[in-house]
Image (spheres, rainbow, N blue to C red):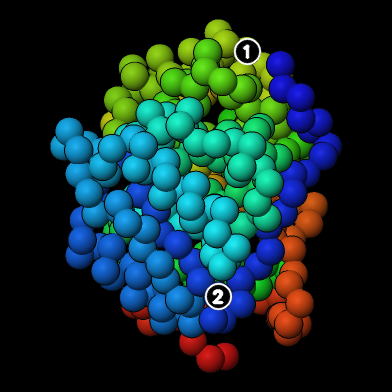
Amino acid sequence: MSTLLPSASLRRPAALLPGDTVAVVAPAGPVRPDLLERGVAVLRSWGLRVTVMPHVTETRLGHLAGRDSDRAADLQAAWTDPRVAAVLCARGGYGCQRMADLLDWDTLAAAEPKPLVGCSDVTELHRLFATRLGVATLHGPMVATEAFDEPTTLAHLHRMLFTPEGIRELPLLAPPLATGQARGILAGGNASLLASSVGGPGPTAPDGSLLLLEEIGEDPYRLDRILTQLRRAGVLAAAAGIVLGDFTDCGAPAAVAEVLHDRLADLGVPVAAGLRAGHGEVQLTVPLGLRADLTAVTGPGESILLLSQAPLRARAGAAPRPRDTPRTDRKDGQPCAS
């Protein structure tokens, strides 16, 4: 059982300011140098100083970004360095579970919270940073991936990092699988990572949470198995509501929809759909660890996810920001002047 209260948001890191230093880490799979270079250029175009941690470009066993101990050391050094204002993951793949137990959690807990950004395999870090550090994190695009070249994705991440006080809602563009209203802490991420965390250290998700689920590359029968495991472990039954992101390359959309309905619609909680988060073409940044209100009603575009507070807290020196979305037309993701 989780010790986190469903009504209590976690500690929020501070928003970024131009001139801040951010660190790029690779806690999971190996990184393509060309994509890393392009992503770092985007961050620098935002006025940030970028530190690429020492082992980011290493490879081990063909599917890891270096040794477990080195990946853990990079993450720990970035998180505990007071000069670093945010930690951004280069990519997912596989490997976070291998290195998570090598982290010194007491030392991490003593450090000032800062935004941690990533998705996919980084779901394991989101889960552990919530349950072991009590810190809210950002489920968002990663620096050395194709998503870091998509204008809407980059504009939303920029807003989330620099002007988060203007973000209080996330749109749900598809009809729900089950209607209703719910309130809870946003948690979750990649469904297969959540399923593989069952039996590991800490709860898979806080009881009473609004559980985000997304997936990539799992055929309908495998998706069925993943959701069935989460059902049997009591993870889905403990959720106050479920929010579905993208299910990318998981087979025929009709077959995927049928499995999702079969495994989720009878839980007795609202199940919303159409959040553009996960592995789709557009990857919105979703704050995890914050309380939110979910309204799932019939009709596409009528459901909504409302955040109880800004995803990040303001910092001294930050000027007041408009609440509208900055337009982003440039490929490097820099918001254009209004």
Query: Toward the viewer: 200 or 258?
Result: 200
Q: Position of residue 94 (x, y in %)?
A: 32, 35
Q: Quadrant of the C terminus?
A: bottom right
* Residue matched to label 2: 20
**Does dot 1 land on a helix, a strand or a loop?**
loop
How many neighbours does mark 2 have within 10 angstroms: few (below 14), some (14-19), or many (20 or more)? some
Amino acid at circle 1 = Gly
Q: Quadrant of the N terminus?
A: top right
For the view shown, which residue lies furthest in the bottom direction?
337
- Residue at image coords 66%, 16%: 237
Q: CA distance from mark 2 to mark 1?
A: 42 Å
Which of disc 1 and disc 2 is earlier in sequence? 2
Q: Position of residue 239 (x, y in %)?
A: 69, 25
Above or below 210: residue 139: below
* Residue matched to label 1: 234
How many neighbours does mark 1 have within 10 angstroms: few (below 14), some (14-19), or many (20 or more)? some
**Can see residue 275?**
yes
On the image, which quarter does residue 201 sit in? top right
Give the total number of marks visible in the rendering. Answer: 2
- Residue at image coords 17%, 33%: 61
**Marks 2 and 1 in Cβ contact (< 8 Å):** no
Query: Toward the viewer: 2 or 248?
Result: 2
